[in-house]
Amino acid sequence: MRHLSRPALLVLLFCILGGAHARAGEITFDAMPFGDFAAQPLFPKQDDAALLTVTLTPETDDIAPGAPFNLLLTLNHAPSAYTYWTNPGGPGMATKIAWTLPEGFQISEPQWPSPQLYQNGGMTFYVHKGRESLVFTVTPPKILGAGDALEIQAHIDTQVCTPRSCNPLRLEAATIVTAARTPGEKDPAVAPVLAELPQKPQSWRFEAADYDGEIVIGMYPQTGANDDPRDIYFFDANPRPIVDSQQPQRLEKDDGVWWLRLPRLPGPARVGERLSGVIWAGNGWTDDSGEASSYRIDLPIGAEGAGRPPGLQRPVERRAWVLLAFSFLGGLLLNVMPCVFPVIGLKIMGFAKQAHKERRAVFLHGLSYTSGVLICFWTLSLLVITMGRGWGAQLQSDWFMFAMCHIFLMMSMNMAGVFEVGTGVAGAGQSLTGREGLKRSFFTGLLATLTSTPCSAPFLGTALAYALSLPPMLSLGVFTLMGLGFSFPYLALSIFPNWLKRLPKPGPWMDTFRQAMAFPLFATTAYLFWTMEAMMEEWHFLMLLFGLVMTAMACWFYGKYQRTHFKRPRAGKALYVLALGALVVGLWLGMPKTSSDLQWEEWSPEMVSRLLAEGRPVYVDFTARWCATCQLNKRVYSDEELRELLQNKNVALLKADWTQYDERITSTLKNEFNKAAVPVTALYKPGERRADLLPDILTVENVGAALKGLP
């Protein structure tokens, strides 16, 4: 939850302004002082039950065999109270309902009413206030005894809050329906509730796509659409939310189409990802009141590349000129590399010599050289376009990201001067061809680009990685502008050869520049590490980091080898072997492992109680990132037999993360287990009051033995 944090200044502001109201369009936020909110006791003396009452209301009291009917679960909140939507937005517990149904009855997942935005302590929440109803569809069996009275019971676990405190609450509600041959009359009070639920879109068409860390919803008005829906907001209902609720959503309009930009939560996009939730319009979606102000949408998220919704190209195309400008600048910077810059003047003088110093002929040689460079870059562009079409999910591949992490780390070390690759090869183009005239200049440009790539690989590697996600034409434009930037000094100096006198002389400044350019590459490498974290389990990610340390050591050994092997061949061979060995160990340590299919949920005392009440054993891992033994213990969960045992025993897995101080974890460790530190691993068995503690250091054997003791 690190992305939910706010600067201390913002928290202080809310403490000072406690109770102030902020307004965003037509949406009102109630802001209360964070200090007061946090300072309240967990269980205040007030009667929590008075803050929320629940009732069950069937659509009809008389039900027919096999005929589905609607059932309303109504939450009646006190004026100051609220509960959370299916996605709480910030920290909070959504309302959960367990059912006791007559034999043969089935019940659907809830249809949630639209939530409200609520802000407290500088954080945004999605809540329900006042009187709100969740709607369920109940399907009776096809055989019922006429006249039978059938009871339906709901067991509600929720978290009821006021601006000053939040507490868990368990409530019960029941209703009785009567079996009949035909359904009875419907309660007229139910229809308005159903009409207020988020509806399927009718007057608007929606599309979604990924762009630069955002998800963009394109909204196209159809017949009957409101020209000014205003204050549009999307509530993410994905099982694993992908929209960052704590960042603002940006609304734009262009040529009759509305665009809503949603900030994406950290982590890589997943294959087949969809955007599911409720989209709300403050001014209504239609010209009349025939439809609700909220739509229920479930959209595939198109990629920026092939297959994206055509209407969503505009937001990216607006920024295309910026991307192309930076591509040209990036190509221009390639010339400052130590293996490129010193030979620029030599190549231009070679052009002049071939053309016998005739200015028009010199220009044609420069143009021919530029053509060779562009051919090389266009070939690379076609490769990228082919990869982008046939390998669209490469950024979700742990093996691809594993390779990118190591490649970018090695490129960063190369730029920093730890070791060298390809120094002095940029002039090889002229020696690789014996052709004369313009053909010689063409092949010189082609081959010089190829042979100088070891020196410029960090730039080209970054461009290659980024261009994989671009549309084909934009990817072609990126590499065209990069090629023009790379060849620009040659082309400009072939037009004005006298400018050669104004070029700065090669010197130590080039090495300084190259080393400075290593830091953006290190930043890219860090971003790749962070992305990889979301794709791996904690133990495997830790091994990846250790493996990258070994890869960095391999680069260092190789750099020492380059500086040693000519003077001391035997020592050089030893360093080469050490470099190769460190690289192998680094790749082996961080190699992507098959992720376990275990699903861990967030621990809470209430969750433990609820799972035990359902008759499930509960396995709790009290852990912390800073605890080395805790991380070592996680290796046991990779064992296939142990995973199968956990699944066969229907064990619920909870993780109590103590990386940041949590009073509930501290209290549980002290009062329940008489422990003051982690790791602590507890196994709760249904029907038993105390949990069994496992050894501090876990093995497959001792965990398996504890699980085999379960019924």
Image (cartoon, rainbow, N blue to C red):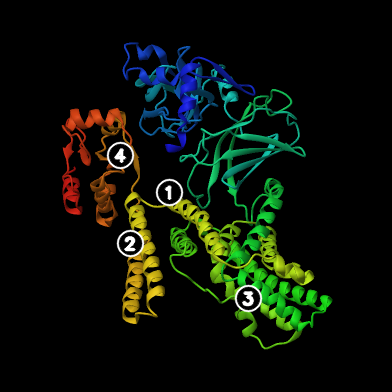
SS under mark 4:
strand
Question: Does 566 sit above or below residue 625?
Answer: below
For disc 2, the marked residue is 589
Front label number (1 vs 3): 3
Q: Amino acid at mark 4?
A: Leu
Front label number (2 vs 4): 2
SS under mark 3:
helix
User: Badge 2 local density, few (<14 within 10 Å), some, or many (20+)?
Assistant: many
Q: Mark 3 or mark 4, which has the lower sequence index?
A: 3
SS under mark 2:
helix
Q: Mark 3 or mark 2, which has the lower sequence index?
A: 3
Front label number (3 vs 4): 3
Percent across and percent down for residue 556 are: 38, 66
Q: Amino acid at mark 2?
A: Leu
Question: Does 518 sit above or below residue 81?
Answer: below
Q: Mark 1 or mark 2, which has the lower sequence index?
A: 1
Question: Does 480 sit above or below residue 649?
Answer: below
